Image (spheres, grey):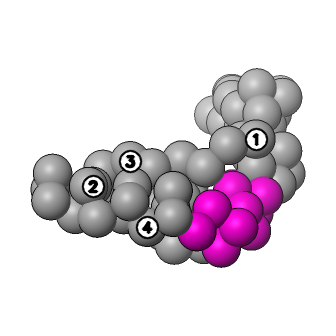
Amino acid sequence: GGLLLTEPGEELKEIFTPDRHVITYRNINELLIKTETIFSNPKSYIDIAKQGHQEVIRFHLIEHRFEKIVTKIKQKWGY
């Protein structure tokens, strides 16, 4: 897995915890600062990358999505 550096959003907060699983930035200046910080000290961000990867493996694979869909169908139609 790699480190995810992305813009914040409500959907993102439903999936990941910023600064625990991903790094977010609000504007181009913040992106540049965070990118420079990451490249100057990459070891400090390895843990965030690993935790983000583990979060995906635990909760966000296609199997997890499919399971949620099936559960909703069963709840709606009583299967």
Amino acid type at image mark 1: Gly
Q: Main secondary structure of the magenta part?
A: helix
4 vs 2, front mark: 4
Whether tag 4 and tag 3 are in contact, CB under 8 A, the answer is no
The residues bearing labels 2 and 1 have C-alpha atoms spaced at a distance of 20 Å
The residues bearing labels 4 and 3 have C-alpha atoms spaced at a distance of 15 Å
The residues bearing labels 3 and 2 have C-alpha atoms spaced at a distance of 9 Å
How far across and how far down the image is residue 79, in percent? 83, 28
Query: The residue tagged with tag 4: helix, strand or loop?
Result: helix
Whether tag 1 and tag 3 are in contact, CB under 8 A, the answer is no
Amino acid type at image mark 4: Thr
Look at 43% across and 67% down and name the residue there: 37
- The answer, for residue 78, to whether it is visible in the render is no
Classify residue 57 as left or right of residue 47.
right
4 vs 1, front mark: 4
Which circle's residue, 2 or 1, is located before the other in the chain? 1
Q: Please say if 77 is above or below 39.
A: above
The residues bearing labels 1 and 3 have C-alpha atoms spaced at a distance of 15 Å
Q: Which residue is mark 4?
A: 37
Look at 77% across and 33% down and name the residue there: 61
Which circle's residue, 4 or 3, is located before the other in the chain? 3
Amino acid type at image mark 2: Leu
Q: Residues within 10 Å of mark 4 (few under 14, many from 20)?
A: few
Look at 22% across and 63% down and name the residue there: 30
